[in-house]
Image: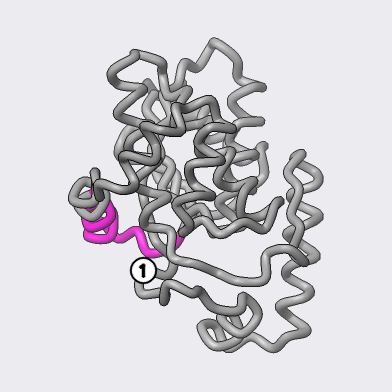
Amino acid sequence: MKIDFVSDVSCPWCAIGLKSLETALERLGPEVPVTLHFQPFELNPDMAPEGEDTTEHIARKYGMPEAQIAQNRAAIRQRGAALGFTFNMDKRGRIYNTFDAHRLLHWAEVLDDEQSSTGANALALKHALLKAYFTDGADPSSHEVLVRYAAEAGLDPEQARAVLASGAYAAEVREREAYYQQRGIHSVPSIIIDGKHLIQGGQPPETFEQALRQIAGQR
């Protein structure tokens, strides 16, 4: 079963969705073999290099009052904690462009293909980048930050630095972003199973488990 996980590293519901999906896959075990692929989506493709205050950005983009933003953050923290993911909202003061993070994730996918490592590099890097932003409050547009967390994920930091400096995989990331947008993906996380079954949002593990069992049964 192929799962395409369309997401952004600055999307809190993507962190929740990934942890929920992984919990569901653990419950299913080897009876449902899966390959997991991360596909790029930028929540803020036009974000300025210096980023923007997160509260101001959400208020402007969604017309949300500050009290509701605080309420949503509390709900996200609780959902994350229940799944073993730590959201430190006080550290995440700004939101940034994530295009280079997606280039690095594409490189990790290429490594997985070359090494036949069934997605291990990309998954480790995805976890590291979500932790970088949401738990550690780091800037995911910074090359130094990306290199540091690539190393934390077990990837070669000098190779990561070379990829970022060269602009490699920019065309591939743009092509994948366009592909999913043209197919109606305008919010994330969007989880596409076998290219035809869509689950959207940070669903609980039970929802993923039930859907995957049903799809596996149909196959």
The residue identified by callout 1 is 45
Residue 35 lies, in percent from the top left, at: 41, 24
Give me the residue at 64% from left, 46% from top: 131
The answer to whether 138 appears left or right of 48 in the picture is right
Asked if the magenta segment contains residue 66, the reply would be no
At x 73%, y 63%, the residue is: 91
Magenta segment:
176-187
Relative to 103, is 13 above or below? below
* Residue 107 visible to the viewer: yes
Total numbered badges shown on the rendered structure: 1
In which quadrant will I find the N terminus? Answer: top left
Q: Is residue 213 visible to us here?
A: no
Disc 1 element: loop
Image quadrant where one finds the C terminus: top left
* Image x and y of residue 117, in percent: 40, 15
Amino acid of disc 1: Pro
